[in-house]
């Protein structure tokens, strides 16, 4: 017991000292984060994306649809993937009607259900044959759910883990060999922010962990892994339904989220500018990350109070 107490005390003092040493660097870091949040993503987009073949999952609505528009206007050959084929037809029609600066190509529609893991390799093969290869894979699709842990059934956890994690992993593993053979490519992970959703958060954390290891394994190649975390967009209302009406109300985080078109522009610019790990969030979440690393007791105190206010 004494050893355990001494170890806990040692960890406390290490964190305190580390926090004290970091204080002189906090202000410059804050200035940089403000610059990064407001200016860095607004890079000039040249014609380096023209003719690139992009597969966008979840392209039938929301951020996925906005990403499809951004890629198409940048001159990319776009593969629209979703399980809702009729909505993809509408998105394709909208894209074809656009006036673009660069040469445009007719989008390809791919009916893809990430919940059907066994069918994903065949769908990936179809996507690869659409234009001959895939240069950029944007893993955007997913399903959301809001509810307290005690009221969330294990079936919900399994559903979200399959769609938001295993489905993306299966798709990446089916397409990655072709990128390795070609000697280049981009694999993008889009993670969104949502409160009161343990199932959703767990699936997103799992996906981010997978992408971090994937980036490490591909570090010696010319395949770039882009992990876009905490992209606070206005989440669409196509998540799993919760019987409790209070979780159907749009919370402040969602209501103040980034416009999908602006978010899509951020994603594409992150790819074009060679960024690897990007946090598209306001200053508050970034400060929360700093508190978590150096002052965890303060972080958990603040999150506990926020949870009480939201319940």
Image: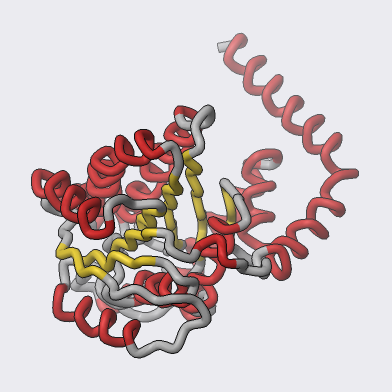
Q: Residue at x 50, y 48 (%)?
A: 226
Observer-nearest of 139 and 104: 104
In the displayed structure image, the side of residue 265 where residue 133 appears, left or right: left
Q: Position of residue 280 (x, y in %)?
A: 58, 62
Q: Which image quarter: residue 42? A: bottom right
Q: Position of residue 23 (x, y in %)?
A: 85, 43
Observer-nearest of 74 and 114: 74
Q: Residue at x 44, y 88 (%)?
A: 99
Q: How is the image coloured?
A: secondary structure
In the displayed structure image, the side of residue 40 where residue 198 appears, left or right: left
Q: Position of residue 179 (x, y in %)?
A: 36, 40
Q: Quadrant of the N terminus?
A: top right
Residue 153 seen in the figure: no
Is 249 situated above or below 296?
below
Q: Residue at x 79, y 57 (%)?
A: 32
In the displayed structure image, the side of residue 62 where residue 143 appears, left or right: left
Q: Position of residue 38 (x, y in %)?
A: 71, 70
Residue 304 seen in the figure: yes
Q: Residue furthest front?
A: 103
Observer-nearest of 154 and 5: 154
Query: Number of labelled discs?
Result: 0
């Amino acid at each position: 017991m004494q050893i355990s107490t001494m170890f806990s005390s040692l960890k406390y003092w290490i964190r305190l000292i580390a926090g004290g040493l970091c204080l002189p660097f906090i202000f410059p870091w804050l200035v940089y984060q403000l610059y990064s949040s407001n200016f860095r993503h607004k890079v000039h987009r040249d014609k380096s994306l023209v003719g690139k073949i992009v597969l966008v999952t979840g392209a039938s609505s929301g951020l996925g649809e906005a990403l499809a528009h951004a890629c198409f206007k940048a001159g990319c050959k776009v593969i629209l993937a979703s399980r809702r084929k009729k909505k993809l037809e509408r998105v394709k029609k909208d894209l074809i009607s656009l006036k673009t600066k660069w040469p445009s190509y007719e989008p390809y529609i791919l009916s893809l259900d990430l919940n059907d893991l066994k069918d994903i390799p065949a769908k990936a093969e179809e996507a690869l044959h659409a234009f001959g290869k895939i240069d950029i894979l944007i893993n955007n699709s997913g399903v959301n759910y809001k509810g307290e842990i005690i009221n969330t059934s294990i079936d919900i956890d399994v559903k979200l883990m399959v769609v938001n994690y295993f489905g993306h992993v299966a798709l990446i593993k089916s397409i990655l060999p072709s990128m390795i053979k070609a000697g280049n490519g981009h694999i993008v992970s889009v993670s969104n922010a949502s409160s009161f959703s343990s199932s959703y958060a767990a699936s997103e954390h799992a996906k981010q962990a997978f992408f971090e290891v994937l980036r490490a394994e591909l570090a010696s190649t010319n395949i770039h892994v882009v992990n876009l975390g905490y992209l606070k967009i206005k989440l669409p209302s196509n998540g799993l339904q919760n019987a409790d009406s209070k979780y159907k109300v749009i919370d402040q985080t969602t209501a103040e989220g980034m416009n999908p078109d602006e978010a899509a522009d951020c994603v594409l610019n992150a790819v074009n500018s060679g960024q690897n790990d990007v946090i598209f969030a306001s200053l508050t979440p970034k400060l929360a990350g700093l508190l978590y690393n150096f002052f965890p007791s303060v972080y958990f105190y603040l999150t506990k109070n926020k949870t009480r206010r939201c319940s």
